[in-house]
Image (cartoon, rainbow, N blue to C red):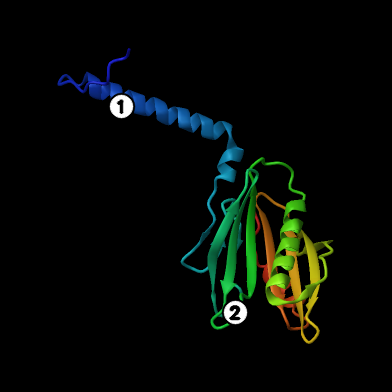
């Protein structure tokens, strides 16, 4: 049975404690360098004091061009995926746009399938909560600037009013899914102009 570490007057115990700490630090550093994907997966996503969202891989999402601010809402996690949920909140109005940052814990190829399902779930949930009847999203490959995305436009109606959901999925590490719900016509160009300002890494 090992004796507990003694910090004797001669300083040997202190030197041994320092050596243990250094050995542990070197071990952690070695594991970190050997597993760069683990570092990327563990990166944080935060809202900065300047009003942008900075994703762990260095991607920067600026404020939406409308008075308001980004705010984080309930995040969800499963054995495979972690999803961070942000809304750009507008005073006395509905969110201008929503963002889901998804990390695949298995670090496999990002094909956007999970994110397209996320959009379908969003549309069904929104329609159920508001009494609208939705179409199902049909995604197409789409480029905004040099960035490749999967885009869908979905119409929802309740007999007297029509809304439209615009969704853009960027299959990346981590992936980005932007969703906006609007009653206005012809807003696609404005949304895509904003998305072109996202600094993707």
Residue at 71% in and 71% down? 128
> In terms of depth relative to the viewer, which is nearer, 36 or 91?
91
Tell me whether circle 1 and circle 2 mark residues in contact (CB < 8 Å): no
Q: Residue 82, position in %: x, y? A: 61, 50
Left or right: residue 161 compared with residue 60? right
Identify the element where label 2 is drawn.
loop
Which sits in the foreground, 86 or 159? 159
| Structural distance between the alpha carbons of marks 1 and 2 | 54 Å
Q: Position of residue 198 (x, y in %)?
A: 65, 64
Q: Residues within 10 Å of mark 1 (few under 14, many from 20)?
A: few
Counting residues from the start of the chain, the first of labels 1 and 2 encountered is 1
Q: Quadrant of residue 4?
A: top left
| Residue beneath the point at 59% across and 54% down | 76
The foreground one among 77 and 34 is: 77
Residue wearing tag 1: 18
Classify 148 as above or below 7.
below
């Amino acid at each position: 049975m090992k004796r507990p570490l003694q910090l004797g007057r001669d300083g040997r115990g202190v030197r041994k404690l320092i050596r243990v700490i250094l050995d542990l630090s070197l071990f952690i550093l070695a594991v970190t360098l050997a597993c760069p994907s683990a570092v990327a997966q563990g990166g944080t996503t935060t809202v900065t004091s300047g009003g942008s969202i900075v994703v762990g891989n260095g991607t920067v999402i600026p404020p939406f061009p409308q008075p308001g601010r980004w705010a984080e809402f309930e995040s969800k996690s499963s054995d495979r995926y972690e999803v961070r949920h942000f809304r750009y909140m507008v005073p006395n109005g509905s969110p201008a746009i929503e963002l889901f940052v998804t990390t695949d814990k298995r670090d496999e190829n990002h094909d956007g399938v999970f994110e397209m399902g996320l959009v379908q779930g969003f549309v069904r949930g929104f329609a159920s909560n508001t009494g609208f009847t939705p179409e199902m999203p049909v995604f197409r490959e789409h480029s905004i600037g040099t960035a490749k995305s999967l885009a869908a436009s979905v119409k929802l109606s309740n007999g007297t009013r029509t809304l439209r959901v615009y969704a853009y999925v960027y299959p990346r590490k981590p992936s980005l899914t932007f969703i906006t719900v609007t009653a206005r016509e012809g807003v696609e160009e404005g949304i895509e102009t904003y998305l072109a300002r996202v600094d993707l890494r």
